[in-house]
Image (tube, rainbow, N blue to C red):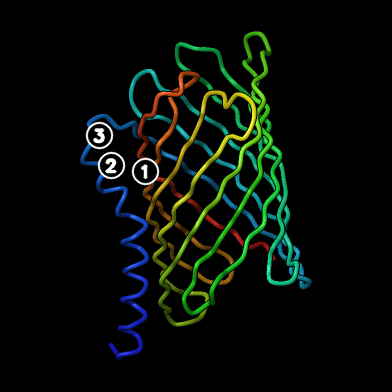
Amino acid sequence: MTDRRWSRFARYSLLIGALLAPWSSARAQEDEVTQQLWADYNPRWTWPSGLELYGDVGLRTELGAGGWGRIVARPGVRGPAGPFRLSGGIGSFYTANEGAADRWEIRPFQGISATWPSKRIRLDHYLRVEERLEFEMADWTLDASLRLRYRLQTQIRWGGFRGDVFWRLLAHGEVFLTVTGESGQFDEKFRLGLGIERGFGPKFRARVDLTWQKVGAPFSGAATDDLYIRVRLFHFLR
């Protein structure tokens, strides 16, 4: 490895270590962790102007007795605006609970993202506003809230035979802030995770993430821990 590549690798290692340091200390203090599995399909359609239609359709489940299962559908659109990218869309989240009423959340969102300070030292920033409308299906009781999310992500990428055949290691952290209203069943506080992604050509990528998150217990506000594996397939239709 050349001196320049070694220097870049060291910088990225420090960034990843800084993102994951709180994870290791929190794990040492907690004994009980909820385990989950997420899987989703992510199609994307991009026009020459840079405008992109994207989304995800997937399933999420809590492993073990007395858990829940969730169906997610979340289409969106994004496009360039100078050095930024603007995005917007709407999500639908149906949660089937064992021993409790099912819940359905409708979630419009708007976001802005940018890469800073540079593509060489890559830090991807994403700020999103979400309007959450969550219904209890037994009697259609509504919990409404407004939430802010900020995600910071970095990556190390190395190529294969072509530019679209590659491996990529990612580290990400995200914080959540409910500004107004009731947060409903899922009240995430923050997340930290690692992911690895493989590009198989111009049409497909696959990614696996291992993420730890701190959440408020349903409707009580008490903090609990989740650890989930997320498997994603990205399909570039155009």
Specify which label sits upstream in the sequence, 1 or 2. 2
Residue 212: mark in rendering:
1
- Which amino acid, mark 3? Glu
The spot of residue 77 in percent (x, y) is 73, 54
Assign a secondary structure to mark 3: loop
In percent of the image, x 35 and y 39: which residue is there? 227
Q: From mark 3 to mark 1, how far is it between C-alphas? A: 12 Å
Q: Which mark is residue 1?
A: none
Tag 1's secondary structure?
strand
Quadrant where the C terminus sits is bottom right
Real-space CA distance between mark 3 and mark 2, rounded to the nearest whole angstrom: 6 Å
Toward the right, the furthest residue is 49
Asked if labels 2 and 3 touch by Cβ distance under 8 angstroms, the answer is: yes
Q: Is 73 on the left or on the right of 78, as rendered?
A: left
How far across and down, in percent of the image, does residue 149 sit?
57, 46
Callout 2, which amino acid? Ala
Task: Quarter of the image for the N terminus: give it.
Answer: bottom left
Residue where numbered disc 3 is placed: 30
Q: Amino acid at mark 1?
A: Trp
Identity of the residue drawn at 44% across and 73% down? 166
Element on which disc 2 rests:
helix
User: How many angstroms separate mark 1 from mark 2 (CA)?
Assistant: 10 Å
Q: Where residue 26 is drawn, which disc sits there?
A: 2
Sort mark 1 into few (<14), some (14-19) or many (20+) by Cα contacts within 10 Å: many
The mark total stands at 3
- Do labels 1 and 2 touch, CB within 8 Å? yes
Q: Residues within 10 Å of mark 2 (few under 14, many from 20)?
A: few
Which of the pair 108/54 is nearer the observer? 108
Query: Vertically, is 70 above or below 194?
Result: above
